[in-house]
Image (cartoon, coloured by chain):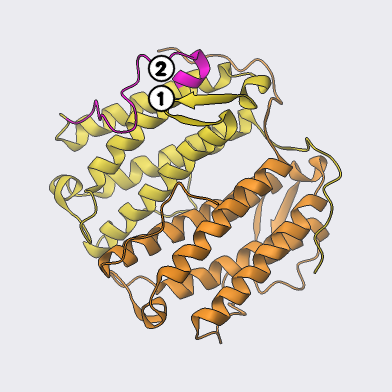
Chain colours: A yellow, B orange
Amino acid sequence: MTTTEITTENTLFISAQDLLSHWLGHRRLTRRVIEAFPDDKLFDHSIGGMRPFATMVKELIDVSGPGVQGIATSDWSNSSGFDEHSTKGITSKAALLNLFDESTDAIASYLPTISAERFQQTERAFGMYEGIVFDLILYFIDNEIHHRAQGTVYLRSLGIEPPAFYNRD
Amino acid sequence: MTTTEITTENTLFISAQDLLSHWLGHRRLTRRVIEAFPDDKLFDHSIGGMRPFATMVKELIDVSGPGVQGIATSDWSNSSGFDEHSTKGITSKAALLNLFDESTDAIASYLPTISAERFQQTERAFGMYEGIVFDLILYFIDNEIHHRAQGTVYLRSLGIEPPAFYNRD
């Protein structure tokens, strides 16, 4: 099999509008995975020394909304960064879901304000992680898929069937 | 927080060329996760009744290369489909990695032949799963991230540190 030459440089794969819809579908699924955990297991269940799922979700919350806001505004002063966990005082599922919903709202508000030019610019997310804006945003989404999938193994190990991966409604 | 109105319909988020680079980075990471498994554990380790990681990888192989080829050619006759596992006779890590590499080559060959118009068309992948082409391709990638992440929990449960999520080199 030979590799086909790329003959154009800028073939639109997905628009920002469709990317947002795609991500919001993932957010709905992630929310259902959080909800599927028993309250206590959300905060204390672990496999192989890994973090409880609530701690992974806190990372997603700290990264996604503030990440998109920081990219949209070029102002990182409101973000706690990957490792600071402004969410660390949270100890209940209900409170975690509230913060998760707030970060979903931030994504939905700020992503549409980012221009096509901006998606191609280099940015230092959280003052630390340099990358092209579209790649940074894909990292946020991929990181959500990654940790959510780890959460589904936690659920299976607890005898709970996870929400269906293909359902994004 | 208010939701900002979307004022344009077709803001380029990512090009097909950059999407391919992004996916190939994920393929390199997925390959490292496969390699990190002891040969026997790749085929028999399980948590909570889930499939062994090799079986998940077979799904990725059956879906990704044939999926992109099918979309590029509108011909699904060469694909085994999500559930048939043309790879089912594979019982060694080396053979699995060879097939994985072949499917990566198929992605790299066929994705650049898909036009901007085609990415927006509706297709019935494998004759069964209807969706817009860009969404079908994102599903293939997301499914890879999802199952690979489940594999990383398997590795942790075996006392093995998974390859770093952020390293796509």
Camera sees residue A37: yes
Location of residue A150 in the rendering, given as x and y in whole percent from the top left corner? 34, 54
Q: What's the residue type where badge 2 is placed?
A: Trp
Which residue lies at the image location 50% right of the left edge and 84% below the top edge?
B92
Location of residue A35 in the rendering, given as x and y in whole percent from the top left corner? 27, 43
**Nearest the eye: A71 or A33:** A71
Q: Quadrant of residue A12?
A: top right
Q: What's the residue type where badge 1 is placed?
A: Phe
Prevalent SS, magenta region? loop
Q: Is residue B13 above or below residue A74?
A: below
**Nearest the eye: A109 or B18:** B18
Tell me which chain the residue with mark 1 is part of: A
Q: Is residue A137 above or below residue B21?
A: above
The answer to whether the residue labelled 1 contacts the one labelled 2, judged by CB atoms less than 8 Å apart, is: yes
**What residue sits right under mark 2 in the picture?**
A76
Q: Is residue B1 above or below residue A9?
A: above
Camera sees residue B71: no
Which residue lies at the image location 51% right of the left edge and 69% below the top edge?
B57
Q: Quadrant of residue B7?
A: top right
Quadrant in which the N terminus of chain B appears: top left
**Nearest the eye: A75 or B8:** A75
* Magenta stretch contains residue A79: yes
**What residue sits right under mark 1 in the picture?**
A126
